[in-house]
Amino acid sequence: RLSGNSSSDDITAKDWYVSGMQVDEGEALALYEVLTEMNLPTGASNTTTTRDLCESPAVSCRTSFFEINVHPGIVDAAGGRISREIHKLKHLATLSVTGMGLQGEIPVEIGGCIGLVTLDLTSNDLIGSVPSSVINLRNLTSFSIGRNLLSGSLNKSLFLGWKHVRSI
């Protein structure tokens, strides 16, 4: 069971949904968990029992994909982490969380976001190195990780499968 925004309100995974899209309960729950771990608003209402994650100012829903696209001015700086559940977001096309104060490492599970077209983690407090699993992000057109606390060097072999990338 999950707790919604209201502390007295217990809900189950089936109560979370992404309007206008065919996503399974697992992906809807994963989207909720990713938003929660990044301290981003879920769009949940305290007045209803069903939660539409597309009502979050951090999420844009389209017919066949959704985007998490936030920066200061859309929502307050979050300061959370990128959830290891992110790999369950098969319909995620954009993850753009510029200047949100995200901490910790980029999880290896990010390589499971095979539909990702834009990955922008610029201006956060991310540490560690870029996981080798990013080689699986073959649909990327844009990859930005500057202005973080990352260490190590980027191995060119990580990017060999990225045939559509226009900017790194």
Image: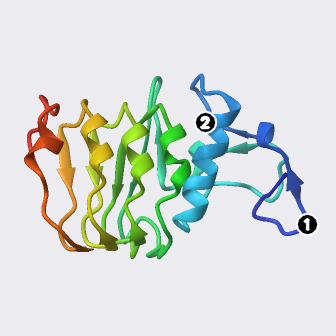
For residue 52, above or below residue 147: above
Residue occupied by mark 1:
8
Q: Is residue 36 visible?
A: yes
Question: Where does residue 130 sit, x and y in percent of width and height?
Answer: 26, 58
Q: Is residue 45 left or right of residue 100?
A: right
Residue type for callout 2? Glu
Residue 138 location, x and y as percent? 24, 31
What residue is pinned by disc 2? 27
Residue occupying image coordinates x 48% and y 41%? 87
Crowd band around label 2 with a 10 angstrom C-alpha radius: few (<14), some (14–19), many (20+): many
- Residue 41 visible in this rendered orientation of the protein: no
CA gap, disc 1 and disc 2: 25 Å
Q: Amino acid at mark 1?
A: Ser
Label 1: state its secondary structure. loop
Q: Nearer the viewer, mark 1 or mark 2?
A: 2
Q: Nearer the viewer, residue 89 or 99?
A: 89
